[in-house]
């Protein structure tokens, strides 16, 4: 499959060179529904008062990162032109927490970029139906969002993701492919999906009360990955493998 082209990244880099040639800016994408932009970074919520809010960013809005400080980054919201802060036209400036942003992989490797996006969401609480870093994600929401910020549209829910995916053998599994599972009493209906991260590892949003995490296939299902074939019963689950890339 042809790798999705992300022209916005080229556009943003061009804007960075035009607007602020003296700095090295890095393009990034917002992965939360709404993010407040502040005049200065602070890890003390009491300091983040309404008068310190500069603007807000929306999901999948593109920004440029100019510098970082701890858990914060100074950004430029290039889709929100502004003049007053520095007496020249630029994207709206301010600070946000870096956990609300995802940066494309510098290598240009789409599979690596996909996994980078998923890893950025580690530590997010599980939330049934969730599709928001900072609030919560479910298993298919994690997968959908990791693909979506990379420019690839796939179905929202796990069973539909399985329906549209190319069916592959375990021996053909590559990082960025998907590991699906179904319950024994209904083996044709997928109820869970995880991203394969390579070397027998998964990235998943497991269940209520837990967070997005890395976990080995062995720890998750009780058998080593290299001993399992697609359609095989492992414990109380039936395992399948799929691909979009």
Image (tube, rainbow, N blue to C red):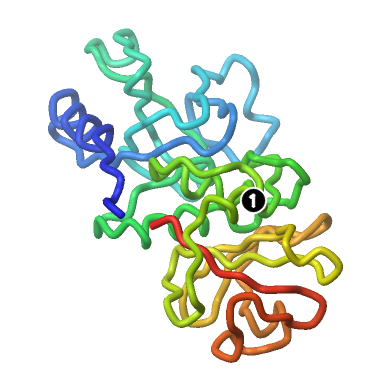
How many numbered discs, if any?
A: 1
Query: Vertical placement of 108 versus 53: above or below?
Result: below
Q: Residue furthest right?
A: 185
- The foreground one among 227 and 17 is 227
Q: Answer with left or right where residue 64 lies relative to residue 47.
A: left
Q: What is the x, y in percent for residue 28?
A: 37, 40
Residue at position x 31%, y 38% from top? 66
Residue at position x 78%, y 59% from top? 207
Q: What is the x, y in percent for residue 182?
A: 74, 65
Q: Which residue is mark 1?
A: 140
Label 1, secondary structure: give it: helix
Q: What is the x, y in percent for residue 201?
A: 55, 76
Query: Vertical placement of 16 versus 140: above or below?
Result: above
- The foreground one among 118 and 81 is 118
Quadrant of residue 82 within the rendered picture? top left
Q: Is residue 30 visible?
A: yes
Query: Vertical placement of 78 versus 88: above or below?
Result: below
> Which quadrant of the rendered structure holds the C terminus?
bottom left
- The foreground one among 209 and 25 is 209
- The foreground one among 236 and 59 is 236
Residue at position x 53%, y 40% from top? 100
């Amino acid at each position: 499959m042809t790798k999705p082209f992300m022209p916005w990244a080229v556009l943003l880099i061009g804007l960075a060179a035009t607007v602020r040639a003296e700095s090295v800016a890095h393009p990034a994408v917002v992965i939360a529904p709404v993010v407040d932009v502040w005049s200065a970074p602070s890890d003390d919520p009491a300091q983040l008062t309404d008068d310190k809010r500069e603007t807000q960013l929306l999901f999948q809005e593109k920004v440029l990162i100019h510098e970082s400080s701890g858990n914060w980054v100074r950004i430029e919201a290039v889709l929100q032109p502004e003049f007053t802060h520095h007496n020249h036209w630029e994207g709206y400036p301010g600070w946000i927490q870096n956990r609300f942003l995802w940066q494309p992989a510098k290598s240009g490797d789409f599979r690596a970029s996909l996994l980078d996006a998923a890893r950025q969401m580690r530590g997010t609480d599980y939330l049934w139906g969730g599709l928001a870093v900072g609030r919560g994600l479910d298993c298919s929401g994690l997968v959908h969002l990791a693909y979506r910020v990379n420019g690839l549209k796939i179905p929202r829910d796990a069973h539909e993701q399985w329906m549209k995916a190319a069916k592959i053998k375990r021996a053909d599994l590559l990082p960025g492919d998907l590991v699906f599972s179904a319950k024994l009493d209904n083996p044709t209906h997928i109820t869970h999906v995880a991203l394969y991260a390579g070397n027998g590892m998964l990235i998943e949003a497991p269940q209520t009360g837990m967070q997005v995490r890395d976990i080995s296939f062995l720890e998750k299902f009780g058998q080593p990955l290299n001993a399992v074939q697609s359609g095989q019963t492992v414990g109380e689950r039936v395992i399948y493998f799929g691909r979009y890339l």
